[in-house]
Image: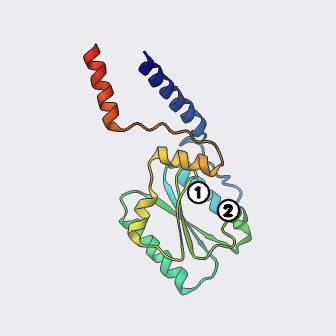
Amino acid sequence: MICRCRTELAIAAILSGMLLVSGTTQAETPWDGDASPGFAALASASKQGRYAFVFFWKEDEQETHRMYDELESALANMSVTAEIVKVRVGDPREGPTVKEFGVARAPMPLVAAVAPNGAVTKAWPLKFHEDQLQDAIVSNGTALCMKALQDRKLVVLCVQNLRRLTASSHGKARRA
């Protein structure tokens, strides 16, 4: 009886946590597409359920071109489809995007991986390796938790290992 109550409480906690965390659905987008060109591109990727790799840059120099070319090449070799969103930090039209990401004083160029729900899952200043991009693609649950944390919301997780879950289901089968 006590075990059943714990299970029901855990399920209730998980469901209420999912309701709190799932503020943005696939149809919605966390970006105001009219605020800047960067937000418009992020909103488009979000509506399509795609990741966006935001390429922030300041100066049109060799290092910027090298990193952008490497990003393009890496995304072409990835199994998931993602968008590249170019944002020049000095462009006044991109002010809202730069402010939202807080990159005005960051070392450039910088690449930020953004999940469809708006969570920043990874960022690389100055350089990165092609194999690192795949690490930025996280599960929907992880993206939801990351977004909630980035929005300064409380996140409650209930984790149960497979061994305990399997033992629990076998016990239920024997009792039935």
Q: Nearer the viewer, residue 166 or 64?
A: 166
In the displayed structure, does residue 105 sit left or right of residue 112? right
Q: Nearer the viewer, mark 1 or mark 2?
A: 2
Judged from this view, the residue extending furthest toward the front is 2
Q: Nearer the viewer, residue 164 or 100?
A: 164
- Tag 2's secondary structure? helix
Q: Residues within 10 Å of mark 1 (few under 14, many from 20)?
A: many
In the displayed structure, does residue 72 sit left or right of residue 56? left
In the displayed structure, does residue 145 sit left or right of residue 172? right
Q: Nearer the viewer, residue 164 or 75?
A: 164
Rendered location of residue 100, percent (x, y)? 68, 59
The residue wearing badge 1 is 42
Point out the tag, 1 or 2, that comes first from the N-terminus: 1
Is 149 placed above or below 70 here?
above
Rendered location of residue 172, percent (x, y)? 31, 19
Rendered location of residue 47, percent (x, y)? 55, 48
The residue wearing badge 2 is 97
Quarter of the rendering occupied by the N terminus: top left
How far is disc 1 from disc 2 in space, using C-alphas?
A: 10 Å
Judged from this view, the residue extending furthest toward the bottom is 62
Quarter of the rendering occupied by the C terminus: top left
Q: How many marks?
A: 2
Amino acid type indicated by mark 1: Leu
